[in-house]
């Protein structure tokens, strides 16, 4: 086992906001009611209703979208040799940001809407860089030596900062 690969901090997050699930459940309910009413009861809402095939396709797409949101998961690991991130299903494997490539870091509060346009796999406005976030408004801000920026959302900001400070004191940063 590589001693530089020891995990010092880990966090796994999923979309858990109640308002997201309320919207998704509500939208799915409307579609499934429509399928039941129109396809199985053979009644249409009005003269401009979707065809049965259109309604089935739209319902299937809504269900697929809901399942996609269910699979989204942000994983963050701080190890002795760097920070690892995976935002599944966008990243199938962990993406490593080694200390050699990190110019500076901070744990900060941010505004997900105004800085990044919301939550998810986001590209920030102007010079904000990328963000991987699923909830909240705190994150690990990395500024890489190539000038690019990455914000990794965290629900454990104090623990992440404590881990990063300990590593900094051990001089893992160049």
Image (spheres, rainbow, N blue to C red):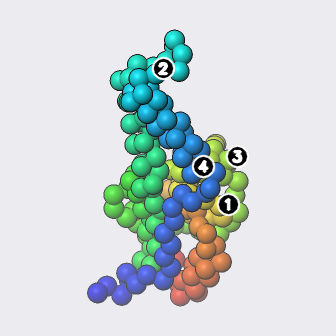
Mark in the foreground, 2 or 3? 2
Q: Which is more N-terminal, label 1 or label 4?
A: 4
Of 68 and 37, which appears nearest the observer?
37
**Percent position (x, y) of residue 53?**
35, 24
CB under 8 Å between discs 4 and 3: no
Report whether 12 appears left or right of 128: left
Q: What residue did someone put label 1 on?
A: 137
Residue drawn at x 42%, y 42% is 63
Question: Which circle marks residue 44 in the picture?
Answer: 2
The outermost residue toward the left is 1
Estimate how packed mark 3 is, as few (under 14), some (14 to 19) or many (20 or more) residues with alpha carbons within 10 Å. few
Mark in the foreground, 4 or 1? 4
As helix, strand or loop, the secondary structure at mark 2 comes to: loop
Q: Which is more N-terminal, label 1 or label 3?
A: 3
Question: Which circle marks residue 22 in the picture?
Answer: 4
The outermost residue toward the top is 47
- Whether residue 68 is visible to the viewer of this picture, yes or no, is yes
Report whether 167 appears left or right of 115: left
Of 15 and 152, which appears nearest the observer?
15
Q: CA distance from mark 2 to mark 3?
A: 42 Å
Figure check: 10 above or below 14:
below
Q: Which is more N-terminal, label 2 or label 4?
A: 4
**Percent position (x, y) of residue 144?**
52, 61
Q: What residue did someone put label 3 on?
A: 114
Q: Which is more N-terminal, label 1 or label 2?
A: 2
CB under 8 Å between discs 4 and 2: no
């Amino acid at each position: 086992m590589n001693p530089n690969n020891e995990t010092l901090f880990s966090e796994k997050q999923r979309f858990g906001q109640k308002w997201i699930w309320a919207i998704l459940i509500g939208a799915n309910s409307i579609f499934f009611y429509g399928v039941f009413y129109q396809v199985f009861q053979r009644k249409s809402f009005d003269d401009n209703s979707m065809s049965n095939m259109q309604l089935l396709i739209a319902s299937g797409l809504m269900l697929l979208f809901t399942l996609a949101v269910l699979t989204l998961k942000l994983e963050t690991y701080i190890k002795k040799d760097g920070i690892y991130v995976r935002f599944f299903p966008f990243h199938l494997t962990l993406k490593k940001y080694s200390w050699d490539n990190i110019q500076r870091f901070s744990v900060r509060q941010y505004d997900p809407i105004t800085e990044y346009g919301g939550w998810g796999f986001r590209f920030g406005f102007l010079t904000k860089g990328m963000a991987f976030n699923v909830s909240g408004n705190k994150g690990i801000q990395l500024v890489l030596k190539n000038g690019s920026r990455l914000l990794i959302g965290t629900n454990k900001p104090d623990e992440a900062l404590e881990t990063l400070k300990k590593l900094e004191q051990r001089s893992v940063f160049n």
